[in-house]
Amino acid sequence: MNGKAYNSRVDTCLSHLPGEGEPIEELTPAWKDHLDIVEMLGVEGQSSDETDEEDPNIYNIRILPWRNKELVKKVAMTDEAKNTTNTYGNLRPGNRPRVRKWRRDAKPSQRKAPRGKPLNYYNQEWYKKLTPGQKRALGAAEEKPFLDTSFDDQY
């Protein structure tokens, strides 16, 4: 499981939300939606990485076949908005950010799908292949519609 990815995504969303007493901006509902998605996915809903065989500084993303493609887009938008520089435009101190690559031939993760997520968080093609018993065990919750969010490079 990838607790670092979860924490990073939560921090990214929180950094774009107004603090107490600050004015609510036009993008606030979008960032609140992204935060809700990341929190609903939890640590168990984050993709995992494996070191590239050719370059140990690159990490290949292992896809989670159970995740809805729209959900994956929302998570990717959050990742793209992560601020990796300080006030002066330099990289933040600490470990350098991971170079994560998504490959078409990426190996799917073998982890089981987490239970109790909203039905629309699951890939419907994947879900239809489950047996009635597997669907019952998965315990999908009521759908939680995604907001139509686009940041258009405004972050």
Image (cartoon, helix red, strand yellow):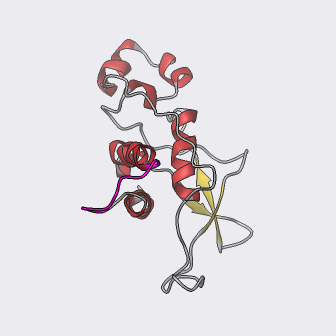
Instruction: Name the residue: 31% across, 25% down.
Output: 141
Residue 30, how many percent across, how many down? 45, 44
Report the side of 81 relative to 38 (left or right).
right
109 with respect to 137 (left or right):
right
Query: Would you say the magenta stretch is mainly helix, strand or loop?
Result: loop
Name the residue: 52% across, 43% down: 74
The question of residue 148 being in magenta is answered with no
**Quadrant position of residue 145:** top left
Per the rendered image, the range of residues in magenta is: 19-27
| Residue nearer the viewer, 84 or 54 | 84
Q: Residue shown at 35%/59% (left/top)? A: 18
Q: Position of residue 50 (x, y in %)?
A: 58, 61
Answer whether residue 22 is magenta in the image: yes
| Quadrant in the picture for the N terminus | bottom left
Residue 31, position as x, y percentages in the image: 43, 49
Left or right: residue 65 compared with residue 36: right
Nearest the viewer among 107 and 68 is 68
Q: Quadrant of the C terminus?
A: bottom right
- Position above or below: 23 against 92: above
Residue 110 in percent (x, y) is at 50, 43
98 relative to 142 in the view: left or right: right
